[in-house]
Image (cartoon, rainbow, N blue to C red):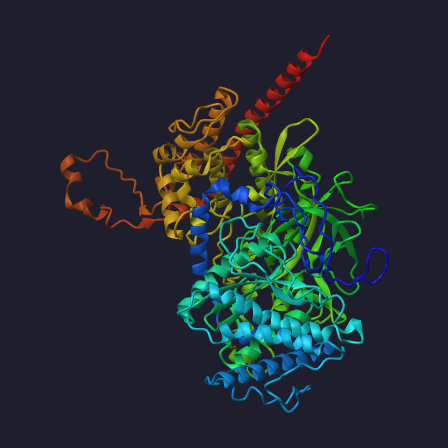
Amino acid sequence: MTSPDGKRKSLSTPEPEEPTTQPQSNYVTPRGKKQKPSVIQGKGQPPSSADIRTPSIQRSGTSRAYSSRLSTTEHILTERHAEAHDHYERRLDKDDDSILSLTEPLDRKLKGIAEEIIEKAALFMESYLRTVSVNSGESADGMSDAIKPRPDSPMQLSNTPTDPSISTQRAGNTSDNSVLLKEKLDEANKWISWKSSSKEKNMYGPIGAFIKYVALVVKEKLTSLADPSSGNGRGCRLVLPSTKSDYNPPDADDTMRIDMGLVGANINSPVEANNGRVLYYKVIAVLEAKRKGDDDGFRDAFEQLDIYTRQMYQQQHNLRFAWGITVSGTQVRVCHFGPNRAKSFPLMDISKSEGRRAFIKVLVHWSLCEESQLGRDPTMEYLRDLKCWQIACPDEAGSMGEGADVKYYYFTTVSCQADRLFGRHTRCFLATDIRPTAVISDNNPLRPKFVIKDSWAFSKRNASEDTRDEVRSLEKVKACLLAKAAEQDIIIPKIEVGGRVSFLRNGGWVEDNTDTLYGRGKLVTDKADTVHGPDELAEDNADDANKPGEVRSNDDLYFRTHRRIVMEPIGEPLRSTTSVAEFVTVVCDVMRCHNAFVNDCGILHRDISPNNILVFRGADGIARGMLIDLDCAIDIDQEKREKREGREKRKEMTGTLPYMSINNLSGSLVEHTSLDDWESMLCVICWFATLGTISGKRRGDGELARCPIGKWRQGSTDEMIAAKQSTFDSCNSFQNLIVRHFKLEGVAGSTGDKSDKIGGTVGKPDENELLKRLAISIHKCLFQNRRLSPDCHGTFEKPKHVELEHGDLSFEELESDEFDGLSNESLPMVNPFKERAEKCETISKQLLEIVYKYWGKAMALQKGALEAKSNATISTVPQ
C-alpha cells in the first residue's frame, strides 16, 4: 500500500500522541448511536504515548448512555452473564491446537530471535526455580529436566545453578538484570507453587511478576540488537501487566472489575512503569484469574473474560479479533475471539516446566508479532502530525489488492461501535476524502462528507458469486432508484465505493476474512479454489479423501469477509426526532423506501431496526427517514430461482432484538417475506412510542422495565416469543398491553401510567392520536385483517376455519353425529404466519396504503409546526 504522496507506508499501528478531542458531532450513521463522549484519561492524566497502541479518538459516545435508556445496569449485566454462559456452552472450542501458531512472528529473522528469547527465558527460569527448590529442601516436581538445554539451544546459561545470569552484549548490566530477574521469579514462584486455599487477590502480584520477567528478557535481547530494524522498531513491544489489578476501566459501560489488563509498551519503557488502570481501548488482552484450578474455575473465568472482551471490541475501533487469558489456579488458557467463535489454546499448567515454557512462548510471540496478529487493523493508521486517523478504502468496486487502487479517507469520530462479541462488528466512521493540511483541533475541526461502514459480513469465498454482498445491493439500489427517488419522494443511501478489505503481509496482498484470522489466508492473486490447513467447521468428504490439503466444509455457511463501504448522506439517529409528527414521518418514509427496495429493486431488507433508520433534515427543516444497512438483504429473484432449482437452504434468523418478527425469532420454516419486515417496523414503532419518541423526554429505566413490552428483550428466546405472541394476538391484547403504555407528548404519563410525568408543551392531541392510530392500523392489517380468512388471524396455531352451509338445518340435525367429525380436535391445525405469507402481496399493498395516509398527515403537521414557529419568530422582531 502506498500513501497519498506515493511513498510506501507501513500499515502497522504507530505509537501516537494522545489525540485531540473533537467537538461532539450531531451526525450519526448506519447503526449509529449518538451518546456522550467517553471519559478516556481518568483524572486528567493522559497515558504515556510509549504504550498507546489504539489511541482514543472522539466518538459520538459510549454505549453507556444508550444502554441506560433501555434497562438498568443490573439488568444489562444479567443479560451479558447469560449470554456469556451461552457462549461458553455453544461458542467455545476448547484445547484447539490449530491456533497455536497464529502469533508466531512472520518475519524469519524475528522468528529466530523469538526462539532465542524463549529458550533463554525458559532455561533461566527453570535453573533458578530448581535452585530455590534445592535450597529450600522442597520437591522439584516438574523441574527435573528444566536445566537441560536443548541440543539446538542458541544460548547457554551459567553452569552454576546458585548464581544464574543472562549473557548480554551490553556491558555492565548483567548484575542488574540478574537481580531484577531473581526478584520477579521469587514473586512468580508464589503462583507456580499456588495452593487453591489462598485468596484470589494474592494471585495478581505473582502473575504480573511472571509476565514482567518475560518482558525483561525480551527487552534485554531487543535493545542489544545491532540492527534496530530487526526488532527495535515498529512492530515489537513489551507485553506488560497493568499496575492496578481488580479495577473497573474508566471507559467501561458497566461496573465489572477486570483482574488485569495487558498492554504493549515501547521496548525502551521501564518494565516497572506505573501504567495505572489500563483502559479497554489500550489493552492487548484482559487476564481473568480464579483461585481454583478446575473446570468450574475455567468456566467462571471464561464467562467474565467474554464480557470484558466485548468491551474491547466496543472501545477499539480497529480491532479485528481479540485475545484473552484465563487463569484458574496454575492452569492457563489463552483464548482467541473471532467473529463467529471463541477458541482456547491447550491447557498450560505453569506448575510444570512444559506449561511455563508454553506460556513464555505466548508472551514472547505477542512481543514480536505484527500488530495484525494481535487483532489490529493494518489498514488504519493514526497520523500524529495531524491528530486524525487515516483509513484505506478500495477506490473501485471489488477488493483492495494487487493492481487495485486504494483511496485514503480521514476521520476523528466513530459514530457506531461494535457492541457484540460475535457477529458483524459493524463500525461507522464520519470521514472526508480530503487530507487535512493542519492539525485537527477545536478551532480546526475535521468536516465529514461521507459515512464509512466497516463490518464482517457473511459472504461467499468467491466474490463474483456473492449475491448477498451489500455493495452489490447498494449498487442495485443506486441504479434502480436514483432517478426515481425524487419522483417517489424518498431518500436512499448512495454508495460511493466499497469492497473487500485486503492488506500487505510478507510482500503479498491478503484478503481479510475468517480464513486469514485463523492462519488460512491466501494471497489475493492466488486463484486456487481449495482451502489449506485446519478448518474450524471442517467435515470429512469421502469423495475427496485422496486430495491432500483440500478441505470441503460447511464453513462456507459461516465464512465472513471484512468489508468497507463509503456512502452518503450523513444522517441522525431515529431517537433524534423532536416531535411525534417527525417520528411518524420518518418511520413512514422508511417503509415507503422499503417498498421501493422490494418492488423496484427486488431486494428484501430483513433487518428493520432503529440502528438502520436515519433522520435526514433538508434545507426546509422537515425531518425525513432513510433506510440503510443491507448486510442482511437478499435478492428476491435470486432466492426464488434457487428455490425452484431445489437448492437446500438453511433457515436464517436475521434482525435485531427486540424488533425481530415472531416468525423470524422462532426459527420457523415459513418463508421470510416483507411482512416480517413490516412486523419489525411495528415493533420499532411500539418500542419508541413506549420509550418516548421525543429526544430528551424519554422514560427512565424503571418505567420501561415495568411495561409489558420490556419482556420483548428479557429471558430466553421462547419467553420473548411468548411475550410477543400474547401482545400481538388480538386487538384487545395489543391495545391493553402495548398502546395504553405509550408515552405521549404533552401528556402526564401514558394513558395508563400517571407516574411518568414529563415537562414540555401541554397537549398534542392530533399527533398523539396519529401515533396510536398508525400502530393500531398496522397491527390490525397484519394480525386481524378482516379482508382475509380467520385462518390468517392471530399469532397462535389453531384449528382450520371451516365454513358450513347449514342454514336450512334444524337444531336436532346440527346436533346429530353427522357433524361430530367437524370438532376442533379433528380439524387440521393452521399456522397464521404461513397463511399470511401466501397473501403477502395483498397485505403489503394494504399496509402501504396505511403508511401513505399517515405520512401525509404527519408531513402536514410538521409543516404547520414550522410555519407557526416562523410566524412566532417574525412577531418578536421589533418593527
Residue at the top extreme? Answer: 879
Tell me residue 760's x, y (percent).
52, 23
Question: Front-most of 141 and 603?
Answer: 141
Q: Where's residue 710, x and y in %?
A: 41, 41
Counting from the top left corner in percent of width and height, residue 271 is at 65, 66
Image quadrant containing the N terminus: bottom right
**On screen, residue 123 above or below 460:** below
- Relative to 750, does residue 485 appear above or below in the rendering? below
Who is closer to the viewer here, 702 or 46? 46
Q: Is residue 187 left or right of residue 503?
A: left
Disc tally is 0
* Horizontal side of residue 877 vs 648, given as left or right: right
Instruction: From the viewer's perspective, tell me whether residue 777 is left or right of residue 230.
Output: left
Residue name at image x 57 percent, y 40 percent: 595
Residue 12 seen in this snapshot? yes
Q: Quadrant of the C terminus?
A: top right
Q: Please indicate, yes or no, whether residue 100 appears anywhere in the rendered image.
A: no
Residue 116, image quadrant: bottom right
Location of residue 316 in the rendering, given as x and y in whole percent from the top left corner: 62, 55
Q: Residue at x 64, y 15 (%)?
A: 872
Q: Dividing the picture into quarters, in which one does residue 181 lie?
A: bottom right
Residue at 39% across, 44% down: 711
Task: Report whether 166 appears left or right of 793.
Answer: right
Does residue 476 lie above or below 263 as drawn?
Answer: above
Closest to the observer: 13 or 130? 130
